[in-house]
């Protein structure tokens, strides 16, 4: 039984926070990200015991180590996990499928949740956590009491996060959700996925402007103390610790599928299409807990700050701005979760394993990033990072090439462009390892269903005779989207005050129902 607490990456004090605080607030008040006070260690014995568990039971064993029993009793946690994965279309939740068996290349399919993207694995769970904490706070209050604690979740999306958040929170009592997206700048399927959800607590705001405009509005709302105090703004963006936690499970689960006997001679690399560094960070936690992963390969698109760091030790924000690529969910300038890895690297390599000193050094680094757009890590830090990580950068051209190639060589398997960035990186590693006469195994994470990114997939495959998007790619569930109606509010004045006005109006309408 654990009594896990959390601390902020930027804190120089011994203060700790509960799991509930980390989930509800998302970000620490000093601007840092929450981390567990200790990373729980799992012995080989325990790994053996876990190797036959279902996804849900495994998630329970892992999460128990990060959430104190006196915060969420184990049986409640079990129910939360069951509910969260009951919406998935695969009984295995995240199945591991062979892609090219002769090369030991496997795909970990993470897109079997309600919105067909890997973010569901975390956001279904986070939605249930929000509901659970609110229910408990409101348990003594009447249904219509004015005293009830409520949360207004506000987020900006360039596509995947918005729909996954909406499906995680739809219909939840005492939670309202507002998702801002740039008008005409997300794919039509992504827009349909959001606007076809008709629950009264879900509000899509189509904002005339860019994704950055949407994000700026959201950031301003978070800093608006008066608004926040009144409407209790909640965040579910990728820095929320509960999202990382939920993603740890599939590293263990897929490892056991490929290496049931825990044969230590079987070297397994995980290849992870990366943007904000949340997905691959979950793999880092799995490794640090004791799962014998050989290497975590960070696969980036042309927005390659992570790849450049792994090659030079310089974490440098590009001045030209973010590039639009075929894998838009990875189009970032800075990876927000990278701060978490930096904290561990500092603590283990530049301090004498001291949390408070690590917070101090990290603060200096974050100031440098803010002022000079640059962090320069000393060589011992880079060396330590390269023990766990490797990295690749993949161009748009290569992304399309690999979708084509895999369609040819892997029985018409169709990759989405994000997954293709990962598979391209996997193929490079396979070639390198073969040249060195090393036999290894590769688990490439598949982060989205190809139907969500029709343009890229069609561009890659339309030359193939007989290929047809509607027949070969589009799942039934997505064909009927929107048939029962759509709801969206257009905001043509992209100002903070206008968005505030809309939020207040919609909340008032909801309270009348
Ligand atoms: C969000 C997302 C990613 C990137 O994951 P991070 O945790 O931000 O690194 C990759 N692929 C898809 C399809 C995504 O939606």
Image (cartoon, helix red, strand yellow):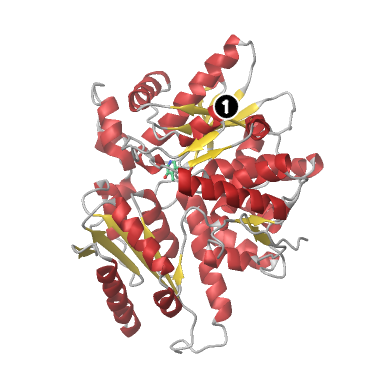
The part of the image, by quadrant, that contains residue 34 is bottom right
Q: As rendered, which of 92 and 451 lies closer to the eye? A: 451
At x 48% / y 88%, what residue is drawn? 147
Indicate if the residue with disc 1 has its beta carbon within 8 Å of ligand 1: no
Q: Say which residue appears at 53% left-offset and 62% top-offset.
A: 26
Using the rendered image of the protein, determine whether residue 27 is visible from the camera's viewpoint. Answer: yes
Q: In which quarter of the image is residue 262?
A: top right
Q: Residue furthest left?
A: 492
Q: Residue at x 26, y 36 (%)?
A: 455
- x and y, in percent, of residue 324 in the image: 31, 38
Q: What element carries label 1?
A: strand
Residue 52 location in percent, x, y?
A: 69, 43
Q: Is residue 387 above or below residue 194?
A: above
Question: For the C terminus, which image quadrant?
Answer: bottom left
Q: In which quarter of the image is ligand 1?
A: top left
Residue 168, picture quadrant: bottom left
Residue sitting at x 60%, y 41%: 283
Classify mark 1: residues with Cα within 10 Å, few (<14), some (14-19) or many (20+). many
Residue 176 locus on image (x, y percent): 39, 71
Task: Tell me: 482 left or right of 357.
Answer: left
Quadrant housing the N terminus: bottom right
Q: Which residue is nearer to you in this view: 163 or 23?
A: 23
Q: Is residue 89 visible?
A: no
Across and down, in percent, residue 107 comes to 51, 32
Q: In this view, does 215 lie above or below 147?
A: above
Tell me the residue that label 1 is attached to.
442
Q: Nearer the viewer, residue 146 or 276?
A: 276
The reply, left or right, for residue 450 in relation to residue 172 is left
């Amino acid at each position: 039984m654990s009594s896990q607490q959390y601390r902020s990456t930027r804190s120089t004090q011994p203060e700790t926070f509960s799991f509930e605080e980390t989930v509800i607030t998302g970000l620490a008040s000093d601007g840092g990200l929450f981390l567990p006070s200790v990373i729980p260690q799992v012995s080989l014995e325990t790994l053996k015991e876990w190797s036959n568990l279902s996804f849900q039971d495994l998630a329970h064993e892992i999460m128990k180590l990060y959430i104190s029993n006196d915060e969420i009793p184990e049986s409640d946690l079990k129910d939360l996990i069951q509910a969260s994965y009951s919406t998935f279309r695969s009984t295995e939740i995240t199945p591991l499928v062979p892609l090219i068996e002769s090369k030991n290349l496997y795909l970990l399919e993470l897109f079997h949740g309600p919105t067909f993207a890997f973010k569901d694995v975390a956001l279904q769970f986070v939605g249930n956590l929000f509901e659970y904490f609110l229910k408990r706070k409101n348990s003594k209050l009447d249904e219509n009491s004015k005293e009830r604690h409520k949360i207004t979740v506000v987020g900006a999306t360039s596509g995947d996060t918005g729909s996954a958040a909406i499906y995680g929170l739809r219909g939840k009592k005492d939670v309202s959700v507002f998702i801002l997206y740039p008008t005409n700048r997300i794919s039509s399927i992504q827009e349909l996925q959001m606007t076809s959800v008709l629950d009264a607590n879900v509000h899509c705001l189509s904002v005339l402007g860019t994704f950055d405009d949407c994000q700026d509005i959201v950031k301003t709302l978070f800093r608006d103390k008066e608004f926040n105090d009144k409407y209790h703004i909640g965040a579910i963006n990728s820095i929320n610790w509960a999202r990382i936690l939920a993603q740890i499970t599939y590293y263990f689960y897929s490892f056991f599928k490929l290496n049931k006997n825990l044969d230590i001679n079987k070297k397994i690399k995980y290849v992870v299409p990366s943007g904000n560094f949340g997905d691959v960070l979950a793999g880092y936690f799995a490794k640090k807990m004791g799962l014998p992963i050989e290497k975590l390969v960070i696969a980036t698109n042309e927005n390659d700050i992570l790849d450049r760091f792994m090659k030079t030790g310089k974490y440098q924000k590009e001045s030209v701005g973010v590039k639009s690529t075929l894998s838009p969910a990875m189009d970032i300038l800075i990876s927000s979760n990278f701060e978490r890895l930096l904290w561990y690297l500092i603590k283990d390599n530049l301090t004498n394993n001291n949390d408070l000193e690590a917070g101090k050094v990290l603060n200096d680094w974050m100031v440098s990033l803010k002022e000079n757009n640059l962090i320069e890590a000393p060589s011992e830090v880079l060396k330590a990072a390269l023990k766990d990580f490797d990295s690749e950068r993949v161009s748009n051209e290569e992304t399309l090439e690999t979708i084509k190639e895999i369609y040819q060589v892997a029985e018409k398997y169709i990759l989405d462009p994000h997954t293709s960035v990962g598979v391209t990186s996997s193929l490079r590693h396979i070639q390198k390892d073969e040249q060195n006469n090393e036999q290894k195994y590769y688990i490439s994470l598949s982060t989205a269903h190809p139907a969500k990114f029709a343009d890229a997939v069609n561009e890659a495959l339309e030359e193939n005779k007989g290929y047809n998007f509607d027949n070969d790619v589009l799942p039934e569930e997505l064909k009927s989207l929107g048939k029962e109606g759509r709801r969206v509010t257009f905001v043509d004045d992209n100002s903070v005050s206008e968005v505030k006005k809309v939020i207040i109006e919609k909340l008032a309408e909801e309270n009348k129902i």
